[in-house]
Amino acid sequence: MTARPTVERDGESIVIRIPMALKRRSGRRQIIVPGGLAGTTPAAPVNQPLAVALARAYHWQDLIESGRYPSISALARALDVDRSYVGRTLRLTALAPDIVEAVLAGKEPGGMSLERLGMGVPVVWAEQRRCIGP
């Protein structure tokens, strides 16, 4: 992978592109996120569960926005997972772009986890930064 994560505006939308590769290990697919790229090696290990959840959230959002699935419920049925799990995961797409970039660079604030984010995060980015930490 040679591309870097990008954040850009498209009208009123924000588009976050996360380069990744799928690799099979022990019969399971694993998402490989950027890490060993020249000049972009993270100072700390990437929080793999959080990075995978972000990639999943943006992929699922794209499936719904593209019209492939008309609703969260339809997507949950297709994935054979609970609707509330899909909803909680999709909430990650509301994270501020700089927080997403920090996670992918292995520089997320201490104590940041999927469990903590699952408890709810403010929608306003400035409030997210205050709640989640620097």
Image (spheres, helix red, strand yellow):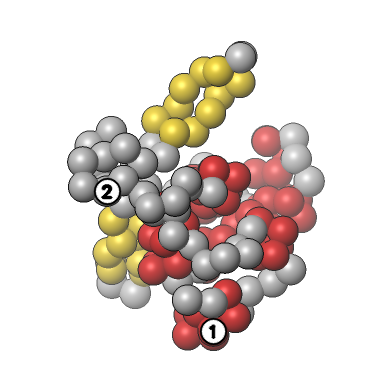
- Three-letter code, disc 2: Thr
- The image position of residue 26, as x and y in percent, is 61, 14
Disc 2: CA contacts within 10 A as few (<14), some (14-19) or many (>=20): few
Q: Is residue 87 above or below residue 127?
A: above
State left or right for residue 120 relative to residue 126: right
Question: In the image, which disc is placed on residue 40?
Answer: 2
The residue sitting at 44% across, 60% down in the picture is 107
Q: Along the horizontal axis of the image, is 119 left or right of 16?
A: right
| Res 60 seen here | no
Residue matched to label 1: 130
CA distance for labels 2 and 1 = 26 Å
- Given the current orientation, which residue lies at the most extreme top position? 27
Disc assigned to residue 46: none
- Front residue of 25/62: it is 25
Q: Where is residue 105 shown, x and y percent of the image? A: 39, 53
Residue at the far front: name it: 43
Q: Residue at x 31, y 37 (%)?
A: 36
Instruction: Determine the image quadrant of residue 81.
Output: top right
Q: Residue at x 54, y 84 (%)?
A: 130
Q: Find residue 19 and report its horizontal and vertical position in percent.
A: 34, 41
The first of marks 2 and 1 along the sequence is: 2
Label 1 is placed on what type of residue?
Answer: Arg
Q: How many marks do you count on the picture?
A: 2
Q: Position of residue 75 (x, y in %)?
A: 65, 44
Q: Secondary structure at mark 2?
A: loop
Which of the pair 37/89 is nearer the observer?
Answer: 37
| Residue 89 vertical placement versus 49 (above, below) | below
Residue 5 in sight from this viewpoint: yes
Instruction: Name the residue at 28% across, 33% down.
Output: 1
Numbered disc in front, either 2 or 1? 2
